[in-house]
């Protein structure tokens, strides 16, 4: 009986080692407790946007534990995550769920695995480049770059809202730049270098 248990656990390890996926997640500080998931569904019940996810967080964790790398990385769930941390706060197993979602997004970008159901990774890339350039977000430029060639009709629908926001002073026509931009660039370049390690 003991030998059978050892064989089955060895098969599970082999399954995970074939992909390296579960090992990569578990070895990170974010996913260190992921094997403690009891599949209670508290994360999914806490999530304000789970209804528009293709897989709720509970299911994503079950898939991670099964080594289903491509299915997880092709999911839109990490991109839809609102980063509100409600799931993390409510998790009885103390899993840092929101940070795991961030890690999955970084893996998608690094391995260039992008779901055709969403272009959120393109939005994140435009946002990151903009913040690196000026040190601040520039909403008008961000929406223009993101929507101009891929969602032109939606961009036109947003024009009246943009004009009213500019009139009220809540949307700037020109980008603002931070002081000591060179220092900021060194910090962001170092952070991106660490991300690649």
Image (cartoon, rainbow, N blue to C red):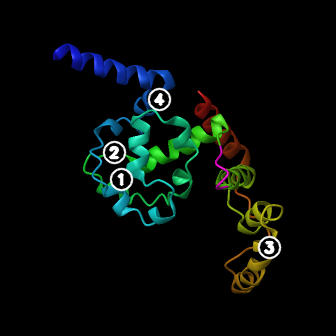
In contact (CB < 8 Å): disc 3 and disc 1: no
Between discs 4 and 3, the one toward the N terminus: 4
In the image, residue 3 lies at what x, y percent? Answer: 21, 13
Crowdedness near tag 1: few (<14), some (14–19) or many (≥20) residues, C-alpha within 10 Å: many
Disc 1 on helix, strand or loop?
Answer: helix
Side of 145 relative to 125 (left or right): right
Side of 26 relative to 188 (left or right): left
Q: Residue at x 58, y 45 (%)?
A: 74
Instruction: Give the residue pinned by disc 3.
Output: 153
In contact (CB < 8 Å): disc 3 and disc 2: no
Gap between marks 4 and 2, in whole Å? 16 Å
Q: Residue at x 74, y 62 (%)?
A: 142
Q: Residue at x 54, y 58 (%)?
A: 80
Instruction: Give the residue pinned by disc 4.
Output: 24
In the image, residue 70 lies at what x, y percent? Answer: 56, 37
Gap between marks 1 and 2, in whole Å? 6 Å
* 36 in relation to 92, above or below: above
Disc 4 on helix, strand or loop?
Answer: helix
Side of 129 relative to 9 (left or right): right
Between discs 1 and 2, the one toward the N terminus: 1
Between discs 4 and 2, the one toward the N terminus: 4
Between discs 3 and 1, the one toward the N terminus: 1
Q: Residue at x 37, y 50 (%)?
A: 58
Query: 113 or 91: which is nearer to us?
Result: 113
The residue mark sitting in front, 3 or 2, is 3
Between discs 3 and 2, the one toward the N terminus: 2
In the image, residue 33 lies at what x, y percent? Answer: 33, 38
Q: Residue lying farthest left?
A: 1
Crowdedness near tag 4: few (<14), some (14–19) or many (≥20) residues, C-alpha within 10 Å: few
Q: Which mark is residue 88?
A: 1
Q: Which residues are magenta?
A: 114-118
């Amino acid at each position: 009986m003991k030998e059978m248990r050892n064989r089955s656990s060895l098969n599970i390890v082999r399954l995970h080692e074939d992909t390296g996926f579960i090992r990569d997640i578990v070895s990170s500080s974010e996913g260190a407790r992921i094997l403690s998931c009891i599949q209670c569904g508290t994360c999914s019940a806490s999530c304000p946007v789970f209804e528009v996810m293709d897989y709720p967080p509970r299911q994503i964790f079950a898939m991670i534990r099964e080594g289903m790398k491509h299915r997880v990385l092709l999911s839109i769930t990490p991109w839809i995550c609102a980063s509100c941390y409600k799931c993390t706060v409510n998790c009885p197993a103390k899993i840092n769920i929101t940070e795991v979602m961030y890690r999955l997004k970084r893996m998608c970008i690094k391995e260039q695995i992008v779901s055709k159901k969403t272009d959120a990774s393109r939005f994140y890339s435009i946002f990151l480049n903009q913040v690196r350039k000026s040190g601040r977000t520039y909403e008008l430029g961000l929406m223009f770059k993101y929507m101009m060639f891929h969602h032109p009709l939606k961009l036109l629908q947003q024009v009246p809202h943009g004009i009213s926001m500019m009139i009220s002073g809540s949307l700037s026509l020109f980008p603002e730049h931070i002081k000591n931009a060179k220092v900021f660039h060194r910090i962001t370049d170092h952070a991106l270098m660490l991300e690649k390690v």
